Amino acid sequence: MSIRVLVAAALAALALTFAGCPAQAAPRPVPWPTVTAGQITARPKPGDAVAVPFTVSAGAGGNRGVVISFDGSTGLDTADRPSNCSYGRAVHGGFHVYCVLEGTTLEAGGVYAPLRPPRFRLAARALNERVEIRADPMDGLDYARERIGEVVSRGDGPPLRLVRTGRPAGPVGRVPGTTTVDLLADSSTDHEIVLAERTFTGAVGDTVLLRPEWRKGGPGFYRSGVDPGVAPPVEVEYVVPGGMSPVERRDLEHCRTRDSAQGHRYRCLTAEPLELRIDEPLEGARGSVSVVPGAKEDGLAFERDRTNDSAVFTVTAAPARGALGMNRWAVAGAVLLTAAVVLVGGVLVLRVRRGRPAALAGILAGALACAVAGTAVLVGPGRPDRPARGFPAPRYRLVASNLWDDSRIHEPARPAGVPTVTTSRDDANERGMTPVSAFFSSAAAGGGIGPDRWIAVDGAYGSIRDPDRARKRMLEEAARAEGVVLVRPPVERTVKDVNGRRVTYACQAVTVRGEGFDMCAWADGNTRAVVTTAASARQGGAFVVSVRDEMRSQYGVG
């Protein structure tokens, strides 16, 4: 049998095999709903609840039942909680939600919208957020459950319902059945630099103290945070005029230094007090403290008002002058030297020419006049406003509201019967003091004096040369006040504060019109206060240190 015959027979058998077999039908396409989202024209702020409009279009053949899923980014959360929805948290910090509309029928070619568009709330740190909306037929319920993982909670509000509408809310998304909505938060910020003093006058050798306050606010303020290991998006820049220099270089140990034609520039992470020494005569020299963009990121890109981002200060300083307009010590030395020369020369002349009492009297009078003039120049009246030496720079202040928490109520006035401790001025030991007085009642007692759980604080903050003197003085004057009887004299203790630094406090017991009170006081280079409590409260002396830790706040922080 030839090869040709064999091939023909094989082909004939193959044809007979498939002759009775019908062709396989093409798979029927599953009708897949399509989601479109509307536009959100308003720019919401963090904290706002935003309604997201969307529509669902049925595919060919329609759908009996549909599953709507929502996936939100880290800065979003759900504001509405329909009862037919299940909620879970995403690994990246966002959320997963799926809603089962089992009894909803999507007719072929129909377009449906939620009766009430779901709302999503922007978190406090929201910036550019996104929510993804997905529609699946009931066959996709298992997939939706897998995506959500563990169900954290179920909704308890009105169920999500779809009603027929006219046309899709927007263009179809790139992925079939899925659309995304961008929620761009209004991330405007409001930075402001305020200087306690803007004009300084003095003389060479004087010091001036810059006390800036960095006020921060607005929804985008969180972009100004400093994360460890990350270059800060916002920094504080000091521009110090030429002819001035920092008193303490350690004040700038965390700052970057750069010199320019305008003076010395220091880029720092926070706004701290900076003490400057006047090295040269100045006439209206200008400096500034400003918030500026960081080295790698412009943290002021969302700033709503740039006019208050900088505060300018001026310094006018004359030389340390005496009566003759020259340096006081140089003038005094020259005049006294002249007096000595005149006196010695006169004595030598008289030894050569004896018997001239008039000449001797004249020489002595001239020498005395020179000596008096030199002394007057040397110890003559200096500038009365020249600051005293030895006072520390004010780095800390007292903020009474820091004591306000769930267990205490900051009362506007002090109840009768609770003593107020007043301390007289001590200009020789204190400078630039700001008084602080506050009373906190017990929240557990519903306010008022309550069952011995109230706190009264009286003090001040500024610059204190001798803290021991200030602490003793407060307790002494409190014990000498009218109606106060000292029951137990002050006892001193030294402990460590929250930062590990040693703090000395002293406590005394007094009675005021028969009522017993404990008064404990502390003082440091910047702050001092007396904390008064009921004697029956038995708070203990170390309690005053915890009050100090809470009340003390660094300038430029908080």
Image (cartoon, helix red, strand yellow):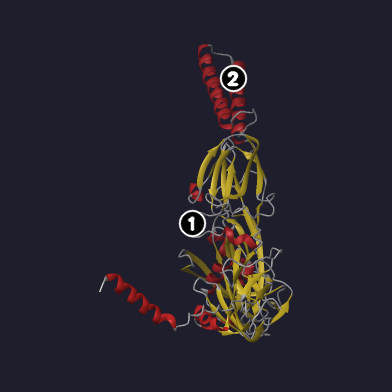
Residue at point 59% right, 32% down?
328
Left or right, 353 with reference to 124: left
Residue carrying label 1: 230
Q: Quadrant of the C terminus?
A: bottom right
Q: Is residue 523 above or below residue 518?
A: above
> What's under tag 1, amino acid-wise?
Val
* Horizontal and vertical percent position of residue 458: 64, 68
Q: Is residue 24 above or below residue 466?
A: below
Disc 1 element: loop
Left or right, 536 with reference to 501: right
Q: Is residue 512 above or below residue 465?
A: below
> What's under tag 2, amino acid-wise?
Ile
* Horizontal and vertical percent position of residue 41: 71, 63
Q: Residues within 10 Å of mark 2 (few under 14, many from 20)?
A: many
* Horizontal and vertical percent position of residue 528: 58, 63
Q: Is residue 128 above or below residue 518?
A: above
Identify which residue, 168 or 428, lies in the foreground.
168
Residue at point 53% right, 49% down?
295
Label located before the other in sequence (1 or 2): 1
Of circles 1 and 2, the one toward us is 1
How many numbered dots are placed on residues in this image? 2
Residue at point 59% right, 30% down?
327
Q: Residues within 10 Å of mark 1 (few under 14, many from 20)?
A: few
Identify which residue, 157 or 35, lies in the foreground.
35
Q: Residue furthest toward the top?
A: 353
Numbered label attached to residue 376: none
Asked whether residue 115 is in view, the answer is no
Numbered label attached to residue 363: 2
Identify which residue, 154 or 65, lies in the foreground.
65
Q: Picture quarter containing residue 342?
A: top right
